Image: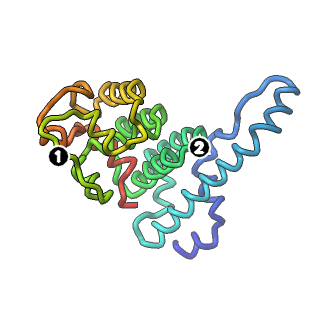
Amino acid sequence: MIDNVNKTNKKDIAHSLAKGGLGAIPVIGSLASEIFGLVLTPPLERRRAEWMDEIAEKLKELESKREIDLDELKENELFIDIVLQATTFALKTAERKKIECFKNAVLNTAIGESPDKTKSQIFLNQLDKFTTWHIIILDFIDSPKNWFEENAKTPPNYMTGNIYSLIIEAFPELKDQDELLGIIWDDLKMTGFHKTGGLKTMMTGNGVLSDRTTAFGKEFLNFVLNKKV
């Protein structure tokens, strides 16, 4: 199988997985068609090519390691669904972190490390709606202590404090962005990804550094940030 894969153009592999009508964006009239072709088609095609190349390269790598079988993936309906959904969303954004998350979702599904179909589709829909900061903050509150350690930073030694101060300590560029943080925090809570009240609720120092994500939030992070692939 590996020999066959090596003889196959990487774009052909990705295209065969993602061609389900994704290139058809309707326009009306010759003027609209001309403007669309001039302004939007080149960057869309570039995004499509980059996305397909990255997915294809990684699938070939996983195949070479005997972690997947491309012939079996062609019959895997969950995988095909996730590829199509993730591709649609990935082409809509230029945010590199979000694109990487969509790629991780596809690859985790390929190796069988994904939640069930319903959760996978919910997670992709939420990822599409989220900004990069949603993902960064959710990953941070999943384990603040680990985040400070992994980033070679000393966590604050609060007697009492709140989550807002902790986030600003980790990401000073968000200082004076109260409204933005409030929206992100509420979004993450509404999706069921964290279990904490207000950002500025006072608590003990140990409480501030506690893990905040729910089991549902952890599943989401594992799906889109999993380092196994």
Mark 2 or 1: the one toward you:
1
From the top left corner, tell me how far across and down residue 137 is, in percent: 35, 40
Residue 108: image tag: none
Apparent side of residue 124 relative to residue 96 in the rendered image (left or right): left
Q: In the rendered image of this protein, does residue 218 appear above or below residue 7?
A: above
Q: Residue at x 27, y 41 (%)?
A: 141
Residue under circle 1? 157
Q: Amino acid at mark 1?
A: Asn
Question: In percent of the image, x 14 and y 32: which residue is there?
Answer: 203
The residue to which callout 2 is attached is 94
Q: What kind of element bears circle 1?
A: loop
Q: Nearer the viewer, residue 24 or 193?
A: 193
Q: Amino acid at mark 2?
A: Ala
> Mark 2 or mark 1, which has the lower sequence index?
2
Which picture quadrant has residue 219? top left
Residue located at (49% from left, 44% from top): 98
Q: Position of residue 47 (x, y in %)?
A: 65, 48
SS at circle 2? loop
Q: Compute the Cα span from label 2 to label 1.
A: 38 Å
Can residue 175 be seen here? Answer: yes
Q: Please report the residue visible at 24 percent of the width from the left and 27 percent of the height from the top.
A: 200
Front one among 105 and 168: 168
